[in-house]
Image (spheres, grey):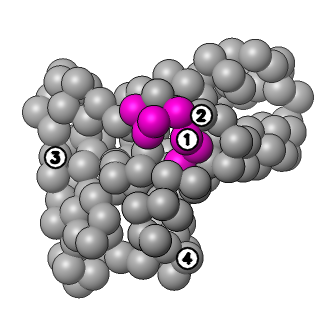
Amino acid sequence: MPFWALDFMRDTLYSGKVFRTFNVIDEANRGALGIDIGVSLPASRVITFMAQLIDMHGRPQAIRCDNGPELTSRVFTDWCEQQRIELRYIQPGKPDQNAYIERFNRTYREELLSAYLFESLTEVRDLTEDWFDRYNEIRPHDALGSLPPARYRDLVLA
C-alpha cells in the first residue's frame, strides 16, 4: 500500500485575493495525485477531496503531513481512523521530515505559481491541470531515473 504526503500552499491572485492549494503526492513514485484550489480549504473539504483521490488511486496505508489545523482537526483524524489510514505527523518546524512534498511544492511554485499573474481561481485551476499532466506524464525526474512519475509507476507495477 502506498504512502501519501500532503501539504498546503498559499498564493495571491492579481487582485490581492488570497487562495490556497492542497497538494497530495504518492511518496513511492513522486507522482502528483491531486491539487485542490480554493479560498477556503477546511477539513471537511480536505476529506471530500481525499475520498475522491482514494476512489481514483486506492487507499494509502499512511499519510505524512504537518500539524496544521485542518490536518489535526477531530473531523480529519476521525475520518483517517475510519479509513484505517495512519497519520504520520512531522515535528513542528521540521519541513525536511516531509521532503517529498516540500520538493513538489517548490517545483509547483517555481514552474507555475510564480510564473503567472492569475486573474481568477478558474485560471489557476486550468493552468494547474495542464501543469499537473505534464508533471506526471512528461517531466523527467532525476530521482526516478529521468522518467516521469507515470512511466516509473508503470515500470514498477509491470
The answer to whether mark 1 and mark 2 are in CB contact below 8 A is: yes
Lower position in the chain sequence, tag 1 or tag 4: 4
Mark 1 residue crowding within 10 angstroms, few (<14) / some (14–19) / many (20+): some
- Label 4 vs label 2: CA separation? 23 Å
For mark 1, give the secondary structure. loop
Q: Does 145 appear in magenta? A: yes
Lower position in the chain sequence, tag 1 or tag 2: 2
Q: Which residues are magenta?
A: 143-149
**Where is residue 74 drawn, in percent x and y?**
22, 65
**Which image quarter: residue 139?**
top right
Q: Does 84 appear in magenta? A: no
- Residue at horizontal 34 percent and vertical 52 percent from the top: 28
Q: Which residue is mark 3?
A: 89
Q: In the image, which is nearer the foreground, mark 1 or mark 3?
A: 1
- Label 3 vs label 4: CA separation? 24 Å
**Could you say which disc has been placed on residue 56 in the image?**
4
Q: Which residue is mark 2?
A: 140
Q: In the image, which is nearer the foreground, mark 4 or mark 2?
A: 2
